[in-house]
Image: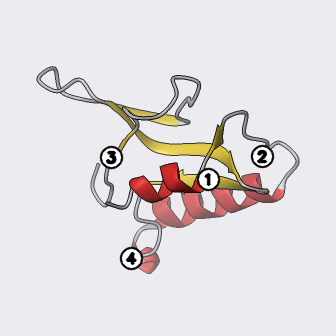
Amino acid sequence: MSNSNAIVLDDFTPDLKPIVRIVDDWFKNRRTALLFEAKVGNGKLLMSGIDLHTNLENRLEAQQLLYSLKSYMAGEKFDPETTLSRAQIQSLFK
């Protein structure tokens, strides 16, 4: 979880399945993710709670993950099943 923040998906449709899920503690038991994808408007979104920008030259694993995610998004397999609204995405930044 270093250099990462959980994305809380409690207010989203159960159809939204995280690519990388985080198991929350048993006190809160929130539905959380580190990575998920969705269709938004006319586009597709891959949202990450992982810091893929800071100090990349010293974080080889982050470099590789960023490369792999970009390759995935550029390919034909990047086809999210769940559709979210722009407002739903914006609610994550409040």
User: Residue 42, percent across and down?
Assistant: 79, 57
Decide: is 15 above or below 55. above
- Among numbered discs 4 and 3, the one appearing first in the sequence: 3
Q: Measured from the top left, where is residue 20 in percent x and y?
A: 49, 37
Q: Is residue 69 left or right of residue 53?
A: right
Q: Give the mark, 1 or 4, whose residue is nearer the N terminus.
A: 1
Q: Which mark is residue 46?
A: 1
Other-residue count near label 3 (Cα within 10 Å), few / some / many at <14 / 14–19 / ≥20? some
Residue at image point 17% right, 27% down: 28
Q: Which residue is mark 3?
A: 6
Question: How far is the residue under mark 2 from the one under mark 4?
Answer: 25 Å
Give the residue pinned by disc 2: 78
Q: Is residue 30 visible?
A: yes
Of residues 15 and 73, the one nearer the viewer is: 15
Task: Check disc 3 and give the amino acid type.
Answer: Ala
Report x, y in % for residue 89. Answer: 50, 54
Among the two numbered marks 2 and 4 on one chain, the one whose residue lies closer to the N terminus: 4
Please give the label number shown on residue 83.
Answer: none
* The C terminus lies in quadrant: bottom left
Q: Are marks 3 and 1 in contact (CB under 8 Å)?
A: no
Q: CA distance from mark 1 to mark 4?
A: 18 Å
Label 3 sits on a secondary structure element that is loop
As helix, strand or loop, the secondary structure at mark 2 comes to loop
- In which quadrant of the rendered view does residue 64 lie? bottom right
Q: Residue 49, can we see it?
A: no
Q: Specify the label residue 54 is tagged with.
A: 4
